Image (cartoon, rainbow, N blue to C red):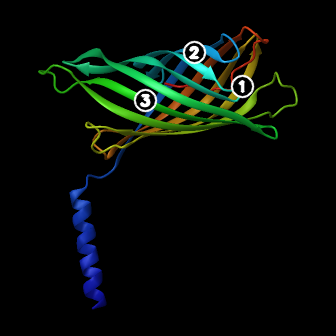
Amino acid sequence: MKYIVVFLCSLITGFAIGQSPRKQVNDQSQSWFSLNSTFRLNSKWGLVGDIHVRRTNFMSDPNFYFVRAGGGYWFSNQLNFVAGYGHMWLAATKKGERIYLDENRLYGQLAYSSRLGKLSLLHRFRNEHRWRESVVADSLPNTTSFSTRLRYLISLTYPVFKNPSLPQACFANELLVQFGKPILNNTFDQLRLFAGIRQTLGKGWSYDFGYMMLYQQRASGYQYDRNHTLRLFFYYTMNRKTPAAPAPEYEDE
């Protein structure tokens, strides 16, 4: 009886493997640059905006260009809500030529920052509504589909040196999941891991620089991109009521 059970289990496992395509992981090198700004109009209201450029094959080829703007409400210096609009130009190929596919995006996010001893923490929840253009075939017009994406990010910053003007260690992890009619095999969208440094430059300016591993599932469900990314983000904060200071934010596309 034992051998029959083992045989049946092996048969079922083999059948399942035969029905499912083998997982494929494509490693890529990328670079990502951005400028992120926060303008505090008063203690409660403010404006935000950012510009992103990501390139693939390290810096050789375009991956996307992205701009975003929004308005924010600060419940306190630790808790804020931001909503706005973003537009992406995603590089693609059609009929052997490079084209750019449009994505229109509405988003809302809630961010909460806190301190635990010397450790600074940021939690961010973001909801995105996306209208994405895609290539069906070279001979057919492009199509546009709608989907929703939910994102949760946690970021940690720790001062390595006593001098606050010297770089601090920065770590972040973000999970992205998506839903909608065109999302059939890849509800899991991406996982983004970041490790690097963050430094205050003065007069409201700061930057973070480091390595990001971006692991993304494609629409097929069995193909994945593992992007090894060099990332350099600049931040600017203007506060009309108090001296300018870096915002406890972590922004990305």
Q: Of the residues under marks 2 and 1, which one precedes in the sequence?
A: 2
What's under tag 3, amino acid-wise?
Glu
Name the one closer to the observer, 165 or 155. Answer: 155
N-terminal label among 1 and 3: 1
- Classify residue 15 by image quadrant: bottom left
Q: Is residue 138 left or right of residue 51?
A: left
Mark 3 nearby-residue class (10 Å; few <14, some 14–19, many ≥20):
many
Check disc 2 and give the amino acid type: Val
Q: Element under label 2?
A: strand
Mark 2–mark 1 contact, CB under 8 Å? no
Decide: is 41 above or below 80.
above
- Residue 234 point in image, percent of width and height: 63, 17
Q: Position of residue 36 (x, y in %)?
A: 59, 16
Dots 1 and 3: beta carbons under 8 Å? no
> What residue sits 65% from the left and 33% below the top?
112
Q: Report the number of discs.
A: 3
Answer with the quarter of the image where residue 141 lies: top left
Density class for disc 2 (Cα within 10 Å; few <14, some 14-19, many ≥20) is some
What residue is drawn where x is 46% and y is 32%? 127
Q: Which residue is mark 2?
A: 48
**Residue 210 location (% of width, % of height):** 62, 29
Closer to the camera, 16 or 155? 155
Q: How far is mark 2 from mark 1, CA to CA?
A: 15 Å
Q: Is residue 203 left or right of residue 41?
A: right
Q: Kindly identify which residue carries mark 3.
A: 128
The picture places residue 114, in percent across and down from the top left corner, at 72, 36
